[in-house]
Image (spheres, grey):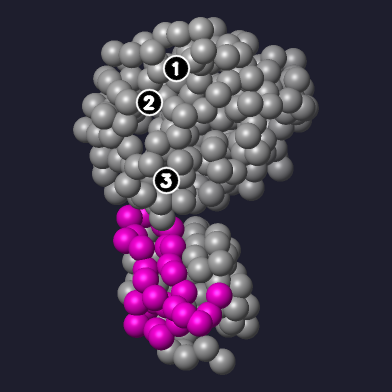
Amino acid sequence: MNAEVGDDVFGQDPTVNQLEAKMAAMFGHEAALYCPSGTMTNQIAIKAQTQPLDEILCDELSHIYRYELGGYGFHSGVAIHVMRGNRGIINEEMVNQGVKPKADWNPRSRMLIIENSVNMGGGNYYSFDQIQSLVKTARNHGLITHLDGARLFNVLAETGDSTLDYGKQFNSISICLSKGLGAPVGSVLISSAETIDYARRVRKVMGGGMRQAGYLAAAGIYALDNNIKRLKEDHDRARRSAQKLQSVSWVEEVFPVHTNIVIFQVAAPYSAARVADFLSQHNIKCLPISDKLIRWVFHLDVTEEMMDSILELPDQLS
């Protein structure tokens, strides 16, 4: 709350400007744009780099496909081609097969969107070698590349890869400062100066222009400076929790845990809603993502004392 602020719609908030410059430099790009949400940064990236009748390619678990209300069509007038990868991870042949031949009746394949880590893949992630190979394939087809990096720093905490190396692979990148990094609000779109210049106009027409946003941006700067290294604590707690879940009678299967997300299937005859209600009685909040699947996400507000509630869960539902 001690941040120096101004009017960001006029580009006059010094703390927002500092955050945007910091993020652009981290990834070796020219500019960045602070937005209220990751959905907005993804949708602006599509709008700013495509034309109506274009097509974007992504995995079927991608956030832009499953959880952004078809915004690609609503905002940008583009089609979408979804690929069925391995828990969110696609390969080069899928891209080769997904790109449409030029014809009056086909949309123009224009953008490949990669999500890393994959939210609905249980925090699954691409290796950097996989990223490089996919991007090379995309560029061979003349595709723009966008990274939905909402949880990219969780990946980097595991792999040790460089933000600068990632920046070289993508025309645009979106990074959430909430999620595991712990800021209360905000996502940043990173790209070229030309793209960001137009993206500012798109942000405004979407209602994302904010005034004294530096109070929020200051929290984002703090998160980048202080909360990246501790992400591995979340990953450790996720893995310990998965081990516990594998031992109880009301869980059928626990998906592999790669970062800070645990997805598990409840055992018959229970429903996810029934198990979620049981967990809430033990002070554990979770999200049923289908009638049989539940998602847990670990973050900096989960303490070791809270972990005791998980590790002491009973074997039987009460």
- Is residue 191 at all visible to an observer of this figure? no
Residue at the spot 42% in from the left edge and 45% down from the top edge: 118
Which dot marks residue 98? 2
Q: Residues within 10 Å of mark 2 (few under 14, many from 20)?
A: some
Lower position in the chain sequence, tag 1 or tag 2:
2
What quarter of the picture does the N terminus occupy?
Answer: top right
| Residue under numbered circle 1 | 109
Lower position in the chain sequence, tag 3 or tag 2:
2
180 or 66: nearer the viewer: 66
| Residue under numbered circle 3 | 118
Label 1 vs label 3, nearer the camera: 1
59 or 119: nearer the viewer: 59
- In the image as oriented, which residue stretches furthest toward the left? 129
Q: Which residues are magenta?
A: 244-271
Q: Splitting the image into 4 quarters, where does residue 99 fall?
A: top left
What quarter of the picture does the C terminus occupy?
Answer: bottom right
Residue type at numbered disc 3: Val
Lower position in the chain sequence, tag 1 or tag 3:
1
